[in-house]
Amino acid sequence: MRRRLLLLTGATTALVLAALLVPLTLLTRSHAVDRATAEATARAQWVASTVGPELAAVETRSVEQAVQSVNGAGLPRTSLVLADGTVVGAPARVTDAVRLARTGRAFTYEAPDGGRLVLVPVQGSPDGTAVVQVALSRARLYDGVLTSWLVLAGIGVGLVLLGLLLADRLGARLVGATRALAGTAERLAAGDLTARAEPVGPPELRLVAGQLNRLAARIDELLAAERENAADLAHRLRTPVAALRLDAETLRDDAEAERIAGDVAALERSVDEVIRRARRPLRETAPGADLAAVARERVAFWLPLAEDQGRAVDVSTPAGALPVAVPADELAAALDALIGNVLDHTPQGTAFRVEVRTTADGAELVVADEGPGFPAAYAAERGSSGAGSTGLGLDIARRTAVDAGGAFGTADTPGARVTLTLPTAGTQDKP
């Protein structure tokens, strides 16, 4: 925009100056011709009035001295053509113009070489009428025109540069204000809801900045309300969870009571984590976790149910730690969603495998089963499901990978395979 504004200002200024300066240059040229002609006419009239009495008195020497006094270096060529054709002063020829001037007419005409001749008759000579001729060369006729044109050109260039300077300052102000707005919008898009735009620049941009600030404040209010609603809903689960714990304590089978109590305790921890996450500031990030350890823990959690359904479970993880840039609770939620999908949507007895491995891009988490694969109408989008579920399970896993800067992929092998590529801890900020 800044460059376009400069081009528009330069073109407009140049057109306006051309419309003004072209007539002015022509006027300067005409004025120089008129001035030179007027000076030559005055010179010719002075010589005629000076030599007239001398010719009447036949004072030839005085006539020659008068004519020679007006000839010199840098002066127009002045000649006196006597009635008998004798020329006094600068060389001249007896032309038709001279013969016309002898009839008593004073006039000016353009010479064939581009100059100008001024002829003034001198009467009183006993031999007849003499003629004073002043010849102006082309260079003398337009003397000073080039200098005037250069001055005008300099003024024009100066005005164009001044216009460009003003346009550049205006463009810098507009571009700076626009970039500031774009930077604020980018920070808001990145999740920094404290970002606010400074109202600078023209009134229109100040209006946009004010509306952007109002939008950011409104988004912040809505997100805060949503977080509180989520926390309240999670808090309401405490009552039925407490009832489950009491029911578990009344069971006569101690082993069964202990198992159910452990499940209820895990559910309570999940509810508490939902409340903490709902009230966590938007841009606050939890530390990363050991993907291998989380995978082993969640497989062990689901193993009793898998065994009840007659499923073979294969777990493959590195012996050491494999830290990734994803919090442990998000990893657990993603892995629970993937294993839960296998348990819910494949026939009992279908085996599945959980594999964690390192790659050149970071770490990979693979959950694959030997079932019928994904439905034909499957779409990995939030709310989409081909088996009558909520459609949120795979989306939880996808968002976990994408939000961390990784990737999410699915494939039929046959069976269904889901792969999460996650950046290792310390590499998510690298270019």
Image (cartoon, rainbow, N blue to C red):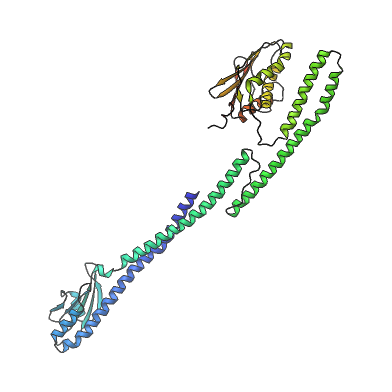
Location of residue 102 by image quarter: bottom left
Question: Where is residue 87 drawn, in percent x and y?
Answer: 14, 78
Q: Which residue is at 49% across, 55% downward? A: 167
Residue in view at x 63 percent, y 44 percent: 195
Give the vertical position of 398 relative to 30 (above or below): above
Q: Position of residue 107 (x, y in %)?
A: 25, 77
Pick whichever, 38 or 175, lies toward us.
175
Query: Does residue 184 lie above or below 353 as drawn?
Result: below
Asked if residue 375 can be seen in this view, the reply is no
Q: Quadrant of residue 418?
A: top right
Could you say which is closer to the camera, residue 230 or residue 251? Answer: 251
Q: Position of residue 341 (x, y in %)?
A: 69, 19
Name the outermost residue toward the front. 320
- Taking 1 as reference, is 332 left or right? right
Q: Is residue 345 visible?
A: yes
Give the residue drawn at x 27%, y 79%.
42
